[in-house]
Amino acid sequence: RPHKSMMSPPWLQNMCRSRVGFPATFIRRSILSKAAPAAETQKAVQLSALIPQRLRKLDPIKDDIPLLVILHGLLGSANNWRSILGKDNAFPGMFSCSVDLRNHGRSQHRPSMTYPEMCRDVLEFAETLGVKKASLIGHSMGGKVAMSLALRYPERVSSLVVVDIAPVAYEATFM
């Protein structure tokens, strides 16, 4: 039986067993075990966000609108989601935005880019909007960031959608 610190919240355990067949403890270990302890002390970077024109005058806190943050994949940017976010009926009832993760697009660039650092960046972005809890959509590397954030800070994630990435550790292979 895994140590209690390696256990995931019950909602994630149920989701993982019913949808992908991986035990949640395996997901937690594969995502979090690679993190260097020193990375926890690094300062978060300011993220650049793509917010649709129709939402720019709204305040997610004052207007009581749930926040949806969309995270792109490796070598992508917030612009990858522009066509979807631009539709008037995209994510109705939500303050939806896409962010450039660190070292991508218009966000700040730093020598280090670990999953714990990117999690902190996304949390700080939500805090600048005054939001304590957000829904996340993550594609590829953004999916890893979203899963890592949900495992590290389950109280800060209201829902999670992971696109095109499995909750396993990938090894680099070169031909």
Image (spheres, helix red, strand yellow):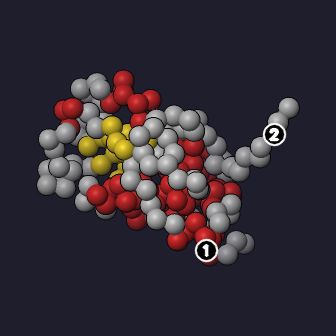
Q: Position of residue 111 (x, y in %)?
A: 58, 54
Residue toward you, 13 or 174: 174
Q: Is residue 168 above or below residue 70?
A: below
Q: In the rendered image, is residue 49 in sight?
A: yes
Residue name at image x 26 percent, y 43 percent = 95
Q: Quadrant of the C terminus?
A: top right
Per the image, the residue denoted by label 2 is 173
Dot label at residue 27: none
Q: Residues within 10 Å of mark 1 (few under 14, many from 20)?
A: few
Q: Position of residue 60 (x, y in %)?
A: 21, 50
Identify residue type, mark 1: Ser
Residue name at image x 46 percent, y 65 percent = 43
Residue name at image x 73 percent, y 46 percent = 170
Per the image, the residue denoted by label 1 is 5
Q: Quadrant of the N terminus?
A: bottom right
Secondary element type, mark 1? helix
Secondary element type, mark 2? loop
1 and 2 marks in contact (CB < 8 Å): no
Give the mark nearest the N terminus, 1 or 2: 1
Direction right: furthest residue: 175
Residue toward you, 106 or 86: 106
Q: CA distance from mark 1 to mark 2?
A: 31 Å
Residue name at image x 69 percent, y 49 percent = 168
Q: Residues within 10 Å of mark 2 (few under 14, many from 20)?
A: few
Is label 1 or label 2 in front?
A: 2
Q: Position of residue 110 (x, y in %)?
A: 53, 53
Is 28 left, or right, of 44 in this rendering? right
Q: Position of residue 114 (x, y in %)?
A: 59, 56
Q: Is residue 64 above or below residue 92?
A: below
Direction bottom: furthest residue: 4
